[in-house]
Image (tube, rainbow, N blue to C red):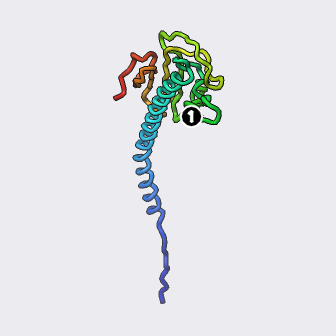
Amino acid sequence: MKTMNDNKGFTLIELLIVVAIIGIIAAIAVPGLLRARMSGNEASAIGSTRTITSAEATFASSCGGGGYDVTAAAAGLSTPPIAGSPAFIPADLTAAFAGTPKSGYDFVLADGPAGTQVLAADICGGAAGATSTQFFATAAPNVPGTTGTRYFGTDESGQIRQDTQAPIAAIGDGQALQ
């Protein structure tokens, strides 16, 4: 009598084919995932830039005596105007001004090109100090080409500009965001 071997399972060739197919699918999907991540980082940078613009306008009208906060760490914007109330900008954006990237972007806040210093009224819990009649905020990718490809900038006009080649140095640089 002959006995039959019952060999159930996959052969090595079949397993190698499955692994190769998974590798091909991964090679196709990863670049798309990276592009989606960059796009998300850029959308976050645009949103953060809008937040900076509205926070500066609110600060100027309520605490800044008509002037904008242009301190490098956004001290006036990160301090609540009244004890127990929220600050003008969230903590992660405050940290971005201090050097911690937010969604792959670095943020810088500075005086505008021809900003003059004005004295702020001290009506917001000591957060007000010398303010300026202009401000300029920029967002640049932390690792250009990896975390983002576009640079953004805004000023007191509220218009956000973008450039794909170089950081925005003045609000006249780049194209206006549509």
Residue 150 falls in image quadrant: top left
Q: Position of residue 120 (x, y in %)?
A: 58, 16
Q: Residue at x 61, y 26 (%)?
A: 98
Q: In the displayed structure, would residue 164 be above or below residue 116?
A: below
Q: Position of residue 66 (x, y in %)?
A: 51, 18
Farthest residue in the bottom direction?
1
Please give left or right for residue 61 compared with residue 123 in the image. left
Q: Position of residue 20 (x, y in %)?
A: 43, 54
Front residue (pair 82, 99): 82
Q: Can residue 139 be seen in the rendering of this structure?
A: no
Residue 108 falls in image quadrant: top right
Looking at numbered disc 1 in the image, what kind of residue is underneath it? Pro
Circle 1 SS class: loop
Front residue (pair 30, 52): 52
| Image mark count | 1
Q: Residue at x 56, y 20 (%)?
A: 64
Farthest residue in the left direction?
178
Q: Residue at x 51, y 26 (%)?
A: 58
Residue wearing tag 1: 90
For disc 1, the neighbor class at 10 Å (few under 14, some 14 to 19, many from 20) is: some
Front residue (pair 112, 31): 112
Q: Position of residue 123 (x, y in %)?
A: 61, 22
Q: Can residue 126 be seen in the rendering of this structure?
A: yes
